[in-house]
Image (cartoon, grey):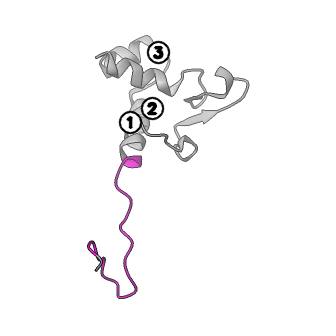
Amino acid sequence: MANLDWSQCPAVESAPDRRSGAWVFRDTRMPVATIFENLELGTSLDEIVEQYDVTREQIQAVLEFAARSLDAPPVPTSATGVADAHPV
């Protein structure tokens, strides 16, 4: 997975005194990485909510942030305001 700037996601935080500074869900000790690991194993969101101290809304916020972060960056335009995909 690409390195995401988790500092821009309001649902998570990193504190040196919790999980060695790993990104965790805000006000918890639950690492964000655990969600992705469980999803890779086929665990459902309902099972994750039952097993860990997080809400469906927290998980959805993290997943939406990750999805938005992987969107293609905007294409810069030239001075004329038209993007040239094939410069001569």
Residue 79 position in % (x across, y down): 40, 86
Residue 78 position in % (x across, y down): 38, 81
* View extreme (front): residue: 88
Query: Which SS type dominates the magenta stretch?
Result: loop
What span is colored magenta in the figure?
68-86
Q: Nearer the viewer, mark 3 or mark 1?
A: 1
Mark nearer the N terminus (3 vs 1): 3
Residue at 33% from the left image edge and 21% from the top image edge: 40
Q: Identify the mark at residue 58; answer none if there is no mark.
A: 2
* View extreme (right): residue: 17
Q: Identify the mark at residue 23; answer none if there is no mark.
A: none
Compare residues 52 and 41 and report the one nearer the observer: 41
Q: Give residue 31's quadrant in the image.
A: top right
Q: Is mark 3 on a helix, strand or loop?
A: loop
Compare residues 86 and 47 and report the one nearer the observer: 86
Q: Is mark 2 on a helix, strand or loop?
A: helix
Residue 26 position in % (x across, y down): 58, 32
Q: Do the numbered discs 2 and 1 sit on residues whose CB atoms are within 8 Å? A: no
Q: Is residue 28 left or right of residue 77?
A: right
Q: Is residue 79 left or right of residue 4?
A: left
Q: Identify the mark at residue 52; answer none if there is no mark.
A: 3
